[in-house]
Amino acid sequence: MKLSLVSYLDPESSREIRAIQTELSGITGSKASLNSWEPHVTVGDAIEVSKEELADVKERIKELCKSTSSFQLRLQGIESLDNWMGGAGETPYVIYLNVQLNNELDMIVKEVADKIKDYDKWYVMPKPYLPHCTLAFRDLTEQGYVKGLEYLQETDPRVTAHIDHIALVEKLADVDRELIRFNFIK
C-alpha cells in the first residue's frame, strides 16, 4: 500500500486554490491538479507499507497529532519547475504556489520524518524541504507551462490556510484517496 502524508487546506483556502487551478486549467489544458486530489501541503516522504504495518503507521501519526496544535500557513509567490523528475508518464513541468515555511510546519515535517523512518519510501520529498501547493503538473505541456506562467505573472495570489490535521492518502492508479485523517488535538 502506497501512502502519502499531507495536510489538506481548509475549505475556504481550498476553494481559493481550486479557483486558481480551474482558471489555470482553462489556459494550460492541464487537468491533473483538478482530478488527482484536493489542494494540500505534503508533510512527509511517501511510504510503502503492508496491510499489517498500516496499524502501526496510524498509531504513530495519531500519537504525533495528540501533541500538535493547529496553525496558519501563508501561501504566496508563484514558482515553477521545467525539470521535474515525476512519475512515469508525467511531464517535467510544474507550477506551484510557494508555502512560507514556519516553525510549526517545520516541526511537523521533522516529527513525521522521525515517525516514518522505518518504512520504505516510494517518494522522497526534495531536500531541503520545499513546501508548496501544486497548481498544475503531470499533464502540463511545455506550451501550457509558458501560457500558465504568463497568466500568473499578472496575478499575485495570497492565501492564508488553517492547518489542523495530517491525512494518510492512498495512491491508487488514477487518483489519490484519503484513507484516514488525524486532527491535531493539543
Image (cartoon, helix red, strand yellow):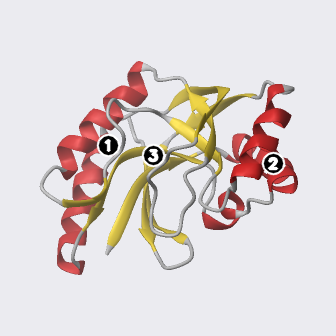
Dot 2: what SS?
helix
Q: Secondary structure at mark 3?
A: strand
**Residue type (three-letter) at the residue carrying disc 2:** Leu
Tell me the CA gap for discs 3 and 1: 19 Å
Disc 1 and disc 2 in contact, CB within 8 angstroms: no
Amino acid at pointer 1:
Lys
- Residue 19's place in the image compared with 173, above or below, is above
Q: Is residue 16 visible?
A: no
Q: Which residue is mark 2?
A: 24
- What mark, if any, has residue 74 been given in the picture? none
- Asked where in the image residue 56 lies, by quadrant, the reply is bottom left
83 to the left or right of 162: left
| Element under disc 1 | helix
Quarter of the figure that contains the C terminus:
top left
| Residue 118 visible in this rendered orientation of the protein | yes
Q: Residue at position x 31%, y 75% from top?
A: 1
In the image, which disc is placed on residue 42?
A: 3
Residue at left offset 21%, top offset 52%:
116
Residue 20, position in %: x, y? 80, 43
- Judging by the rendered image, the residue that carries numbered circle 1 is 66
Where residue 87 appears, x then y in whole percent?
45, 63
147 or 30, which is in the foreground? 147
Is 107 situated left or right of 32 in this image?
Answer: left
Tell me which residue sits at (16%, 49%) in the image.
117
- Say left or right for 8 vs 186: right
Nearer the observer: mark 1 or 2; the answer is 2
Relative height, residue 30 to residue 16 (above, below): below
Q: Position of residue 11 (x, y in %)?
A: 70, 48
Q: What amino acid is at disc 3?
A: Thr
Q: Nearer the viewer, residue 66 or 96?
A: 96
Q: Position of residue 22 (x, y in %)?
A: 82, 53
Q: Residues within 10 Å of mark 1 (few under 14, many from 20)?
A: few
